[in-house]
Image (tube, rainbow, N blue to C red):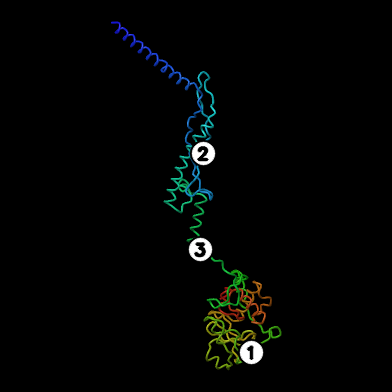
Amino acid sequence: MKKFITILISCSLALAASAMAQQPEETAKPKKEKAEKSQPANEVKPAPKVKEHAETKAPGYNKGVTESTATTPKPQAETKVKGKGKEPANAEATATGEQGVKGKKEHGAHTESATATNAASPSATVNAPIEKGKKGRNAHTEAATANKTASPAPTVAATTTTNQPNAQGGNKLNAQAKKPDPQTIQKIKTEHASFHAQPKPDKVPAVTFSESYRISGSEQWQGPQYEVFRSYHPERHDRVWYSSHYTRIELIGGGYYFWNNGYWYPAWGYDPSAEYYAYDAPIYVGHSAEPPDRVIADVQAALQQLGYYQGEVDGLLGPLTRQALVAYQTDNGLYATAVIDEPTLQSLDLG
């Protein structure tokens, strides 16, 4: 019986000792939790994710890597201290550490994104957001480049020179070329409607007949409108011969002329007493068959208005008139024939 009581007391003591051993451990646990709650924490609420702006790659960046720029400032973390209310906590160190970890993750994400973009489009130089909204300088630059590729810039024409035959049988147009005013031409033609030239051997010497005479330089004047000048050579016939070959022969400015297919020619020999010719060559007047002195007067007046002719409007194709014709023809890309030909008359709007 004593044994039994002794054993029972021993068990009771062991149980009591075990219970007392557990009680301090459980009491320490709440105290530890309370201490942790009461201790000021350096933790910071994680900053809200900041929308990152993609930037174009700069020459110094690693290939396939872009940087992100956070535009929102870091918020200061707040914590509760037992018995002291809200108080701003200095979370700079903790925030910096978290930002570093976060930056590494974001850096890796951007690296993978940029690498994937470069793999898909090797020629791309900007990220997807910029490509999507590209309407500014880059778009204009690409458009300009495309236009240049599609439409090459026009070549600037070189300065033209004179005395070089062109495709129409004349000279290249000079920058000093002048054209008569249509109203002025109409006025000139009205004023000379009844014009008649008079011989002036003292001012405009007459030329003499020469069967071997040829118009100088005419072999170089190309085109059908210059054929009569290339083939012209003076002929001397009597009145009967001219009357049997041509229907119109007139005394104009001291000499007889015959009309043939738009041109007046000197009728050498028709009347030996009336052979005053200021120049021995065909004169183009067109199919209206106007008298040559009237057409010469129109040309002189037009050249006078343009500043080429300084002499008197006398209806005679003298040296001053021929000089003015050469200057005008040269400036307007025509052969310098020194006579009134079809291209010259049309250029002056007198044809």
Q: Amino acid at mark 1?
A: Glu
Residue found at x 63% / y 92%: 272
Left or right: where 212 falls relative to 136:
right
223 relative to 2, above or below: below
The mark nearer the N terminus, 3 or 2, is 2
Label 3 Cα crowd, 10 Å radius (few <14 / some 14-19 / many 20+): few
Which residue is disc 3 drawn over?
A: 152
Q: Position of residue 304 (x, y in %)?
A: 66, 74
348 relative to 75, above or below: below
Residue found at x 56% / y 66%: 156
**Badge nearest the viewer, 1 or 2:** 2
Residue found at x 53% / y 19%: 84
Q: Position of residue 59 (x, y in %)?
A: 53, 50
Q: Amino acid at mark 3?
A: Pro
C-alpha gap between disc 1 and disc 2: 105 Å
C-alpha gap between disc 3 and disc 2: 45 Å
> Which mark identifies residue 275?
1
Q: Using the image as rendered, state which of residue 96 and residue 316 is in the foreground.
A: 96
Which residue is disc 2 drawn over?
A: 70
137 relative to 263, above or below: above
Q: Quadrant of the C terminus?
A: bottom right
C-alpha gap between disc 1 and disc 3: 63 Å
Q: Position of residue 264 (x, y in %)?
A: 57, 84
Q: Amino acid at mark 2?
A: Ala
